[in-house]
Amino acid sequence: MIDPKTLQEAILTFANPDNCVAYMLERRWPNGVVCPTCGRTDAAWVAKRRVWQCKSRHAKRSFSAKVGTVMEDSPVGLDKWLLAMWMVANCKNGVSSWEMHRAIGVTQKTAWFLLHRIRLALGNIPASKIGTNEGGPVEVDETAVGPDPYKMHSDRRTKQRAAYGQKPKAIVMGMLDRDSRQVRAQMIPNVKRETLQNAILEQIEKGATVYTDGWTGYDQLAAQEYIHATVNHANEYVRGQIHTQGIENFWSLLKRTLRGTYVAVEPFHLDRYLGEQCFRFNNRATKENPLNDADRFAIAVTQIVGKRLTYAELTGKEANSTAEAF
Ligand SMILES: [Zn+2]
């Protein structure tokens, strides 16, 4: 089994294209290759072109390990894709497209597109709810992200401004299940009660304990069958177990990444940066779960299957020529 343990080992291992395919194969199709078009499981391996050939007659009969993943249609080699994924999964404060460009030898523009495809793959919010195991507790908070994330606070005035639709900074809502140590974060259009409450109903199991600050948007949670406790930031930050310091810690990690690595994050792309940050937070090493770089990388590769992102989806416009293929 191909399983590089360090970045250096990964570079050496993935220099061999057959190792790249073998690594992908073990994660993507652990029970054998499946044709992405028709589902047949007896495709023949064409070693010379490093593709499989399906035995049924249909379009896209021959397919590579990239088909049906975020890497589909990308002319960038699997070796570079895998190293890029290693970097994103393991660089604590994120990787900029310029760093990626220098590290793996693609243009900065290509690196940018690669990064966004990887972020998309990492950022899926699971359908399952949090707060399920003995009710969390789950810390819920929102924060505003703007051009200078260090200046942003989720203080009352920011919230009021946002609630009345002024100054469109991006607002991010986060939830941290203190029991499972899993965090979820998403962009929200405003901090009105309806918005916040719907997000909570979608993601947190009813009956769970929810800790928030004293914002009025949260004041009906008890009526929604949650056990709700608040901490009033004006007078106190911690009242025993009732605090939101876990999610606030996540905010400071997020803002450090946005400020340090990603010079300008447009709100349009912010969701994917959030996904990347959540991935690293949720797969960080803990006493109970001592994940290492190789483990995190394997999880990242497993997540890329079945997700695609086109240039048009990424930029909101059509690629003007195939020369713009990444
Ligand atoms: Zn087929």
Image (cartoon, grey):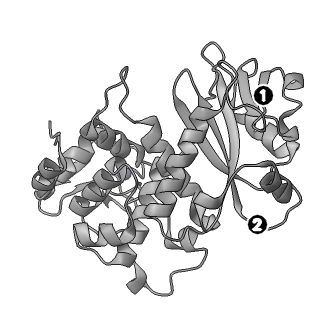
Total numbered circles: 2
- Residue 168's disc is 2
Q: Label 1, label 2: how many angstroms apart (C-alpha)? A: 27 Å
Residue drawn at point x = 88 percent, y = 39 percent:
216
What's the residue at 57%, 33% (across, down)? 246
Contact, mark 1 vs mark 2 (Cβ under 8 Å): no
Residue 46 rendering spot, x and y as whole percentages: 16, 56
Q: Earlier in the sequence, mark 1 or mark 2?
A: 2
Going 41% across and 44% down the picture, which residue do you hit? 303
Q: Which residue lies under the disc numbered 1?
A: 230
Amino acid on which disc 2 is placed: Pro
Q: Is residue 234 above or below residue 13?
A: above
Q: Quadrant of residue 294?
A: top left
Give the number of the disc on residue 203. Answer: none
For the residue pair 281 and 111, the one nearer the viewer reads as: 281
> Residue 143, image x and y in percent?
68, 50
On screen, residue 49 versus residue 204, left or right, reads left
Q: Nearer the viewer, residue 293 or 60?
A: 293
The image quadrant of residue 267 is: bottom right
- Image quadrant occupied by the N terminus: top left
Expressed as whole percent of the image width and height from the top left, the position of residue 231 reads: 75, 29
> Is residue 48 rendered to the left or right of residue 256?
left
**Residue 71 drawn above or below residue 180:** below
Left or right of 30? Residue 260 is right
Count neighbours of disc 1 (C-alpha within 10 A) and say few if under 14, some if 14 to 19, many if 20 or more: some
Q: Amino acid at mark 1?
A: Thr
